[in-house]
Amino acid sequence: MALRNCPPGHTSRSSCLHNLATCLRDRFKQGGIPSDLDESIDLHQAALALCPPGHSDRSSCLNNLAVGLGDRFRHGGILSDLDEAIDLLQEALVLRPPGHSFRALSLNTLATCLQARFDQRSVLSDLDEAIDLLREALDLCTPGDSLRSLSLHNLATSLQQRFKQRGVRSDLDESIDLRRAALALCPPGHSFRSLSLNNLAISLRDRFNQRGALSDLDEAIDLHQAALALCP
């Protein structure tokens, strides 16, 4: 109804398109109906068309469309959706320079998409770029920042992936340090504590397999046991 009251040329049309697109995407997450996501993407594309270069809402429109395309890639596995999402996020990041309140979030979102493309194509430059972006994101996250735990996890994951490709010990060591820091942000009772325990344990097991230090394996076992205790 609101969109019908905002015909082409109406000053609020872009906002109405965005709101409807967001609701359809939310319904897709609940019901998994692909047509909801497709329509959401179409609406976000229409909203972006109303935000040309220089428009104050362009970065948000770029990001919203990219998120929808990323969802469709995860649902349908179409790489062109992921490629387009990355292009959009790269443009959005340019519009969110250092100091922008959403830059850390944009860095994480783009890095996650680059990680996903690396998983599909194994192009190391995507992984290297993701790591660089996540380092910057982590630098922007002060202690207590809600994005800090996510940045730690994402960077640790990317470094561990790169270690598996190149075998550089420092990547694995740094990954373990980051996972320890992430675990410290998930005290007993935290919803992600079990995941953090398992992630750190897996990294320690990887290092044991490479170097044979039993202390790493012992710690990994303790962590897995602690994680198991949280999963009755």
Image: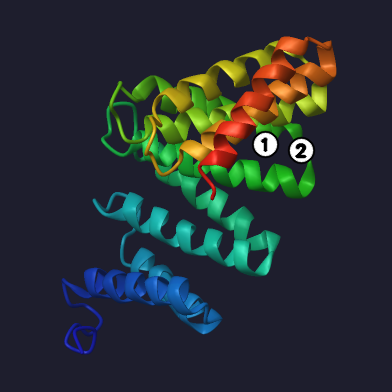
Q: Nearer the viewer, residue 80 or 58?
A: 80
Residue for badge 2: 123
In this orientation, which residue lies closer to the viewer: 224 or 136?
Answer: 224
Which residue is identified by label 1?
126
Q: Could you give the CA–CA distance between mark 1 and mark 2, rounded to whole angstroms? A: 6 Å
As displayed, is residue 222 above or below residue 213?
Answer: below
Residue type at mark 2?
Val
Q: Are marks 1 and 2 in contact (CB under 8 Å)?
A: yes
Q: Looking at the image, how many numbered discs can be counted on the residues?
A: 2
SS state under label 2: loop
Estimate the x, y position of residue 141 in percent, counting from the top left: 34, 25
Mark 2 crowd level (few <14, some 14–19, many ≥20, 10 Å Cα): few
The chosen color scheme is rainbow
Report the side of 153 relative to 119 (left or right): left
Q: Any mark on residue 85, and which?
A: none
Vertical placement of residue 230 versus 200, above or below: below
Task: From the top left corner, tell me how far across and down residue 67 is, in percent.
Answer: 46, 58
Q: Which quadrant of the figure contains the N terminus?
A: bottom left
Q: Mark yes or no: residue 42 visible.
A: no
Q: Nearer the viewer, residue 29 or 50?
A: 29
The percent coordinates of residue 79 (x first, y second) are 69, 59
- Sort mark 1 into few (<14), some (14-19) or many (20+) by Cα contacts within 10 Å: some
Q: Circle 1 — which element? A: helix
Q: Residue at x 66, y 69 (%)?
A: 76
Residue 36, above or below 207: below
Q: Position of residue 190 (x, y in %)?
A: 38, 39
Q: Is residue 229 above or below residue 48?
A: above
Q: Is residue 231 visible?
A: yes
Q: Is residue 9 left or right of residue 107?
A: left
- Name which residue type carries label 1: Asp
Q: Residue at x 78, y 40 (%)?
A: 122
